[in-house]
Image: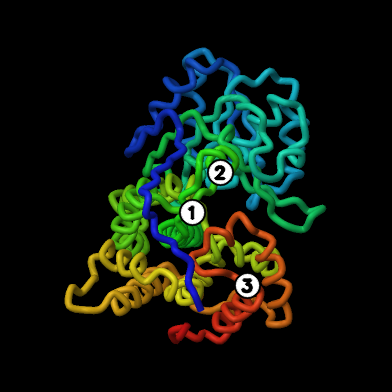
Amino acid sequence: MTMPDISNRIGLGLLRQPKTVVFGPGKRDQIPLLVAPLGSRVLICTDARMATTVEFAGIRSAIEATGATVAVFDQVEPDLPRTNVVELVAAFGDAGIEVVIGIGGGSCLDMAKVAALVLHTGRDISEYYGENLVEAPGLPVITVPTTGGTGAEVTCISVVFDADRGMKVGVASEHLEPVAAVIDPELTVSCPPGLTAATGADALSHLIESFTDRAKNPGADDIARHLYVGKNVLTDIFCRTGLELLNTSLERVVADPSNLAARADTMLASFCAGMAINTAGTAGAHAIQSPIGNLTHTAHGIGVGALLPYVMRFNLPANVSAFADIAAAFGIADPQATALDNARAAIVRVEALLAALGVPTNLKDLGLDPADFGYVADQAMLATRLTANNPRELTREAIVGILERGYADDHTWWEN
C-alpha cells in the first residue's frame, strides 16, 4: 500500500503553553506568589485523598497567609464525570471565585480548567464539548500535578465522562490553557504504585504517539481552527527529551518509589509529553483505548499502555525513521544496524519499560471480550481528531486487526 508522507518537510514549529512554568522539588512555595496578582477569592479543586495530606494543608495555609480566601472542592472523581462538574457549580457558582487551582492527578487538573470556564460563563459544560467552542478565557487557572504522567498541567483540553452519551468527550480550546503550572516532584512521592504505573505508561504513550504522528504542515487557517496540527520541529524537541528521561526514570521509580531524582525525571518527562501533545496530539492508541476503557473500566494509562506495542507494530511500516530515532533517544541505536532493525529495537524497549511498570502485555488481561472488537473499532473511528494524527491510515478493519493481535498476545511484526 502507499504510505502517507508524514515528514515535516517545511519545518513547522508550533507550541501552546502556560505563561509560567515552575519546576523543581519544593517549588510549591511559589503558588501564593502566583495567585496574588490574579485574585483573592480562590477555589482549589482536588480529590478526597489529596485534601487530607500535610502537603495540601501547607499549600492552602500559605495562600491564606497572603489574605486570600480559599474554598475547596475535594470531591473530584476519577475520569471526571459531568455530574461532578455540575456539583461544583452548584456549590460555588455564587461564591465570586476569581482564581481556580487544580491540585492532583489529571482529573483534578481537568476539573480546574472546566470549572474556571463554567464558573465564568454560567453555562453547562456540555455546551463546550468539541474543539474551539470556547469563545474567550475563563477564570485564571493554576495547575499543580501530583502524578507524573497525564501532562494535563500544560494542556488546553479537559476530558469529561458524560454518562448520557456513555463516553468520554473533550473540551478543547486554547482558552483552557492554564496561566501557570507548578510542578513539584515532592508531591508525587506518596503517589500509590498503581497510579504511578498508569500515569507513567500514559506519559510514555504521549511521547511515542506525538513523536511518530503524521506531520500535517497546516496553513494559517488550519492552525487557527484546530488544536492538533501534527508533529513538528518544536514538539520533537520535547519528545526526544522526554523519551531520554523515561528510558531510565521509569524503572528507577518502580525499584524505589521514594527516589526523588527518579520522580523528578518522570515529572519532567510528563511535562515534555504534555507540551508535545498540546499541538501534535495523540493518535491510534488513545483513540482505541477510550471505548475499551468504557467497557472494561481499566485505568486509562494501563489500557493505552497495553495497546501501545500493538499500535506501534501496525504503524512501523509507515514511519520507520521516526521509530529508529526513538532507539537513538533510548541510547540503544546500533550504527551498524538497519533503520528497520533499530526501529524494532525501540518497540522492544518500550515493551520492557511497560513490563517494568506492570502493564499487561495483552488486551485479554484487560477483560476485553472479542465479541466487542467491532464495537471498539466503530467507536475508535469516531475519534477523528486522534485518528487523523496516526502515521498509518486507521480503518475499521485495521483496528480489528490490532485488537485481534493484542488479544492473542501476538508480538510478531506486521509484514505490511
Q: Residue furthest right?
A: 164
**Res 216 label:** 1
How far apart marks 1 and 2 lie (CA) works out to 10 Å
Q: Residue at x 45, y 33 (%)?
A: 18
* Residue 56 in picture, x, y percent from top left: 50, 35
Mark 3 or mark 2: whose residue is earlier in sequence? 2
Disc 1 + disc 2, Cβ < 8 Å: yes
Is residue 294 shown above or below 95? Answer: below
Residue that carries the numbered disc 3 in the rendered image: 395
* Residue 329 in picture, x, y percent from top left: 28, 61
Residue 157 is drawn in which quadrant?
top right
How far apart marks 1 and 3 lie (CA) works out to 19 Å
Q: Secondary structure at mark 2?
A: helix
Residue that carries the numbered disc 2 in the rendered image: 222
Is residue 407 shown above or below 185? Answer: below
Q: Residue at x 36, y 68 (%)?
A: 323
Q: Residue at x 60, y 40 (%)?
A: 225
- From the viewer's side, name the closer residue of 252 and 120: 120
Res. 54 in view: no
Q: Residues within 10 Å of mark 3 (few under 14, many from 20)?
A: some
Disc 3 marks a residue whose amino acid type is Thr
Tag nearer the camera, 3 or 2: 2
How far apart marks 3 and 2 lie (CA) works out to 24 Å
Mark 1 or mark 3: whose residue is earlier in sequence? 1
* Residue 10 in picture, x, y percent from top left: 37, 49
Disc 1 marks a residue whose amino acid type is Lys
- From the viewer's side, name the closer residue of 316 and 300: 316
- From the viewer's side, name the closer residue of 233 and 144: 233
Res. 225 in view: yes
Disc 2 marks a residue whose amino acid type is Asp
* Residue 169 in picture, x, y percent from top left: 69, 51
